[in-house]
Image (cartoon, rainbow, N blue to C red):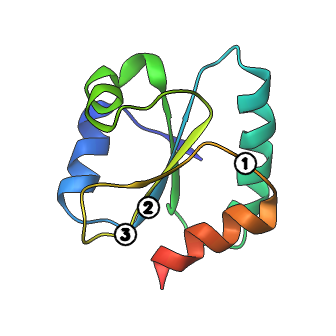
Amino acid sequence: MREIGQKEARRAIWEGCKLALFVYTPMCGTCAAARRMLEVAEHLLPEGAVLQCNINYIPALVQEYQISSVPALLIYNGENEIPEIIYKMESVEHLLNRIRSVME
């Protein structure tokens, strides 16, 4: 997963990119487990479909989407600027299905 900042995330959203944005904090054990699941899923998705942001560097997005905890996966369908937000990382299969549902 490629790390992006707030400006790059806003640009991708504004351009209508279909993507999944993984929001995490570096010292979070649950975030590390979710990252491993997403890394597995990423191999079965188009390149660049999953990006990541450290929550400490995206305060405007956190406030705008009212992200309440990490890990969080924001899924953008390319048509609507308001993402689907997933907080419960159930399984690789679940994450893969949710991300694929907007990629098609």
For residue 89, the mark is 1
Q: Which residue is mark 3?
A: 77
Lower position in the chain sequence, tag 2 or tag 1: 2
For marks 2 and 3, give the CA distance.
7 Å
SS assignment at label 2: strand
As measured in the structure, the alpha-carbon distance from the residue carrying label 1 to the one carrying label 3 is 19 Å
- At horizontal 71% and vertical 73% (from top left) the residue drawn is 44
Q: Which residue is at the far left?
A: 14
Cα gap from disc 2 to disc 1, whole angstroms: 17 Å
Q: Nearer the N terminus, badge 1 or badge 3? A: 3
**Residue occupied by mark 2:** 19
Q: Amino acid under label 1?
A: Met
Image coordinates of residue 89 in percent, x first then y, are: 72, 48
> Is 15 left, or right, of 103 in this rendering?
left
Image position of 66 with respect to 22: above or below: above
Q: Position of residue 57 (x, y in %)?
A: 38, 20
As helix, strand or loop, the secondary structure at mark 1 comes to: loop
Of marks 2 and 3, the one in the foreground: 3
Amino acid residing under circle 3: Asn
